[in-house]
Amino acid sequence: MDYDALLNLGTELGYKLVLSGAEIYRVEESVLRLLTAYGLQPQVFALPSCLIVSVNTPAGHPITQMRRVPPHGTDIELLERCNDLCRQLCREVPPLPEAAELVGKLGQDHRSYPTRVLLLGYAAAAAFFTAFYGGTLLDTLCGGLCGLAVGVWMLWASPRLRFNNLFQTLIGAAIASLLALVLVHMKIGGQLEAITIGTLMVLVPGMALTNAMREIMVGDIFSGLSRTAESILTATAIALGVMVSLAIGN
């Protein structure tokens, strides 16, 4: 049996799971079940930025592979595909080349929404939260416009300028609050707080913080602290962006 190829198979599946934003327990358990189905007894250690998989051959020779995971978001569709494929491989245990081919195809036919739909999502989410926080109809429309501006920055301008996530969020928050100030100053919107908070909700790392708390509670301390630190930094960037725009407005 080609143990190097088996290790590559498990590591590649785990890498795609981490890249999709899966919980750490899901990544470790999926790789463990997959390699166990092929007759190995692996050791798996995962973090949001790193994956380490180690196996011992029958001769007692340890083989270890480490993959560095770049900054990523959450991709529910890729996560579901990885989950389904892992269950299929554990159930059927196909030949190794066939399994490696299936894992390699996970991201090839990946569906993605066009940019205009994503921009509509930014605008709709910001408008909804503006209304939720007590904004009037005009405030809601202003919130949607601010959300659209944030979407243009996050999806189009920022990737071309290659900012990291911290500065990307900081500038996005500044754009949102500064545009809200302008709209209120022009008497189009009336409640600055509702427009600003409603728009900033599209930048809040709610899923990351939720996963962080869950991982801490189940014992994945390092991963939970890492995600918590990332969430705190993102929240700090949002606050700094608002402070910058308010300073400019004043």
Image (cartoon, helix red, strand yellow):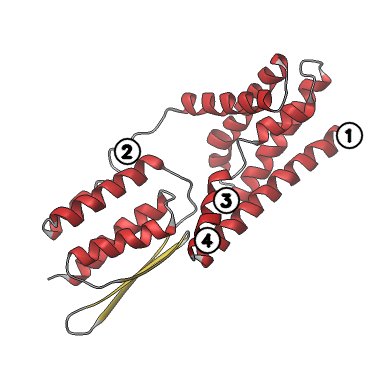
How far apart are labels 3 and 4 at the CA level?
12 Å
Amino acid beneath label 1? Asn
Q: Earlier in the sequence, mark 1 or mark 3?
A: 3
Asked if marks 2 and 1 touch (Cβ < 8 Å), the reply is no
Label for residue 250?
1
Q: Earlier in the sequence, mark 3 or mark 4?
A: 3
88 sits to left or right of 160: left
Neighbours of disc 3 within 10 Å: few (<14), some (14-19), many (20+) = some
Residue pointed to by mark 2: 110
Position above or below: 45 against 241: below
Nearer the observer, disc 1 or disc 4?
4
Residue pointed to by mark 4: 217
110 sits to left or right of 240: left
Residue at 42% across, 43% down: 75
Residue at 36% across, 46% down: 79
How far apart are labels 1 and 4 at the CA level?
44 Å
Amino acid beneath label 4? Met
Position above or below: 83 against 2: above
Residue pointed to by mark 3: 209
